[in-house]
Image (cartoon, helix red, strand yellow):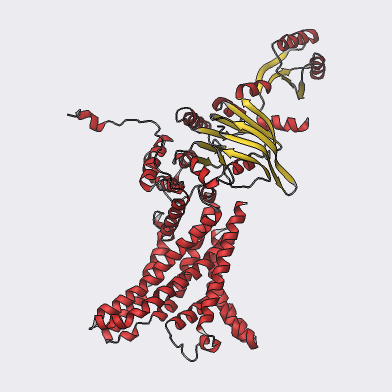
Amino acid sequence: MTEPRAAGTIYDLGYQRYAGPRLGRNSAIANLIGYSFRAAFGIGRGPKAKLLPMIVSGVVFLPAIVQVAVASATGRPELVNYANQLNFTAFLLALFVAVQAPELVVTEKQQGVLSLYLSRPMTATDYAMSKMFALSGAMLLITLGPQLFMFFGKVLLSPTPWTLIKSEYPLLGPIIGGTMMTSIFVAAIGLSISSLAVRRAQATASVIAIFLVLPAASGIIRTVATGSVRKYILLANPILVISGFTNWLFDVQARRRAVITRLDLPGQAYLYLMIGVTVVGVATLVWRYRRQNA
Amino acid sequence: MSLISARELTKRYPGVTALDALTVDLEPGIIGFVGANGAGKSTFIRILLGLLPQTSGTVSVLGFDSQKDALELRQFVGYMPEHDCLPLDVSGTDFVTHMGGMSGLPFAAARERAAEMLRHVGLYEERYRLIGSYSTGMKQRVKLAQALVHDPRLLLLDEPTNGLDPAGREEMLELVMRTGREFGIAVMVTSHLLGEIERVCDHLLAIDNGKLHYSGPVAAFTQQTQHLVLELDDDVPAFADRLRHAGLEVSKHGYELHIAVAGDEMYDTVRDIAAELEVPIGRMEVTRHRLQELFAQMQHD
């Protein structure tokens, strides 16, 4: 029989040594990816940090919901257009990355947390790549999520789900591949720009500039330029590059008067351009942290 | 096995030699690490953590090569930087748990030890609040807790009392002493206040211009640096001359004379000179130089 008082007694056991397993580098990397992924949505942070990511995460589903709803009301499943979804939400993706990429890297550098991470069992490259993984993963959630919703919405609302799933499932490849490539591309731009910035606001402004000012500037230059400059300056617009890529992926023909039609590039060109920008972005990010460490 | 063993450790930056052929062996205990600003303290700490490659020489920490085995080594080292290093919009308990995981602890163990360490440094209900709402003293405690969460064998503390009020300093020093004595964790602590080092540490490591200046028991060093301060009303230069004549090391600071402590006969000499010159002594006190002054003086010599 236990003493009745024992239940309410607090024992000071003093300092306890830790004799359990130490999981080392891989565990540290997994931890940083998980923590940063949650931070991208403001989870485990104050209420202000949740505001924007939560709004964006909700709003990106709106075009998907509307498309599925209209398609089901009119009985025309072809109205669900995966390529359009990315075009509709490109601005939101840019906004998300402009606010959350600085949150993941600039804030940690400013607050000095980076020096604690680098004194843990991980290298500077591990740190940079973990951030890249975490932000790409967060972007994937808000790009792939709505498209999967569209896919299953289309299937489930169809009078003949089984027939539809058989004709529709080859699209899962482009859906997953396209959103993955887009997520990595946008994350690489956001993180590389942020890693070069000193302040958060400066990083956010620079990323916004890439996605909003650059397209506008390329439009203006286009009106005065001639020849091939007039044509290829359009590629300075990352959102247009994403559109070109997804149109090719889903074999969508842009409207005849759209600028992208005038560019008249083979679809793969957009993919290669995105891969190129991503590689440069990741290399910049890694270089920045390796140098920080030296 | 030595705790830290450096052999001819040299670090050169373009135009500056931060560490100059430093050879030293340190045993577990509480080690005070002192040196003027720019003496090479941070460089040494960064090399110990494997954050910076040395130009030449070797250093092993806990038996690990600090360069080649850095990732392995860091699982057993806790580091508390001098500067701010905490996120503001995360709670103390979440952050320390996360840092436990970052050091290789499984999640359940990290959470349990985070709670234990925060209690240990004296944070109770506050640990669920966001760090941004903490006072400087509470933040320093969280910094210490995150350095202890993975039960390191060596704790590197860089100016842990910086920015604290006198009461906060006392508490932090108490924690450092308990960590070293009760927990049995080796501690290396930097401070620019010799008084703090003297109270807390048993071993002193002093570097100056990247060179080893002293490594040994604290008591032996503080004796070397003790000074007798004389405040005189008059005749200061004459008094100083007589003292020098008697073979004592004297420096003049306005109406004060600082005499390097050199045995008990020194007091008799002072008394005799005062009687001879008929100069009243306003104040007489044995003090220790602040390290900053000490190093400034060494550079003069």
Q: How many numbered discs, if any?
A: 0
Please state the horizontal and vertical placement of residue B268, each as a whole percent of the image: 73, 8
Please state the horizontal and vertical placement of residue B153, each as a whole percent of the image: 49, 36
Image quadrant where one finds the N terminus of chain A = top left
* Left or right for B117, reference B21: left
Please state the horizontal and vertical placement of residue A281, each as a whole percent of the image: 56, 67
| Identity of the residue furthest to the bottom in this view | A256
- Look at the image and tell me whether residue A61 can be seen: no
Q: Quadrant of residue A67?
A: bottom left
- Above or below, A223 against A129 in this view is below
Q: Quadrant of residue A32?
A: bottom left
Q: Quadrant of residue A282?
A: bottom right
* Left or right for B286, reference A73: right
- Above or below, B276 against B81 in this view is above
Which sits in the foreground, B253 or B86? B86
Which sits in the foreground, A253 or A237? A253
- Above or below, A281 against B124 in this view is below
Please state the horizontal and vertical placement of residue A237, each as a whole percent of the image: 55, 77
- Look at the image and tell me whether residue B211 can be seen: yes
Q: Residue placed at 71% from the left, 19% from the top?
A: B231
Q: Residue placed at 50% from the left, 70% from the top?
A: A185
